[in-house]
Image (tube, rainbow, N blue to C red):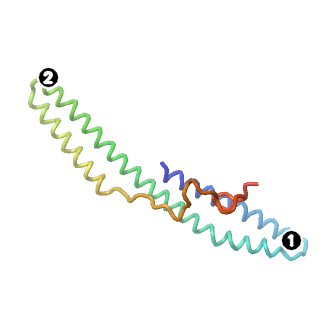
């Protein structure tokens, strides 16, 4: 879930950059219509956005992929745990009813649960590694800007 949230944050950041880039396009176009040279700062910012956006998009896609892998592993662990619970319930019935066939069925369920648990364990993706993020308690270097460099004013 946290990885999916980070992916959504990156997509939102990408969208914000895209909107800002579109606004700059409009400003540059308006300047050209008025036969005025566009501001250098606008052209520089437009170029900066063009460089940043593919990186942001690639990171968001990677986080989405990692999130899907974690979800698949989680679901396999969940199925394994459910089979263990069912096997425990069936063995309890076996004891009360004094029927060996229920005991064999519970053993089969337990073995399938162990196989699924092993599969999930072997195929689980690595944990997300944070990229040079400051500790949660530290203040940002420039309080006028948020985490993604967008002005909070």
* Residue occupied by mark 2: 96
Identified at 48% across, 48% down, the residue is 1
Task: Say which of 101 and 124 sits in front.
Answer: 124
* Residue occupied by mark 1: 31
The numbered disc on residue 79 is: none
Left or right position of 15 against 108 = right
Discs 1, 2 touching: Cβ within 8 Å:
no
Q: Residue furthest front?
A: 138
Task: Say which of 128 and 4 sits in front.
Answer: 128
Q: Secondary structure at mark 2?
A: helix
Left or right position of 100 against 75 = left
Residue 11, by quadrant, is: bottom right
Identified at 62% across, 67% down, the residue is 53
Left or right position of 39 against 58 = right
Q: Position of residue 119 (x, y in %)?
A: 27, 53
Q: Secondary structure at mark 1?
A: helix
Identified at 41% across, 50% down, the residue is 71
């Amino acid at each position: 879930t946290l990885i999916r949230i980070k992916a959504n944050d990156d997509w939102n950041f990408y969208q914000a950059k895209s909107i800002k880039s579109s606004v700059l396009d409009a400003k540059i176009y308006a300047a050209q219509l008025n036969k005025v040279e566009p501001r250098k700062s606008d052209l520089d910012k437009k170029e900066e956005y063009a460089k940043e956006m593919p990186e942001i998009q690639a990171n968001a896609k990677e986080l989405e992929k990692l999130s899907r892998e974690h979800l698949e592993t989680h679901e396999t662990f969940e199925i394994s745990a459910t089979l263990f619970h069912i096997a425990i319930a069936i063995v309890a019935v076996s004891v009360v009813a004094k029927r060996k066939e229920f005991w064999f069925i519970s053993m089969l369920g337990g073995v399938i649960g162990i196989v699924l648990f092993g599969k999930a364990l072997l195929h689980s993706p690595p944990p997300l590694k944070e990229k040079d993020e400051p500790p949660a308690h530290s203040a940002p270097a420039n309080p006028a800007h948020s985490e993604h460099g967008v002005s909070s004013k």
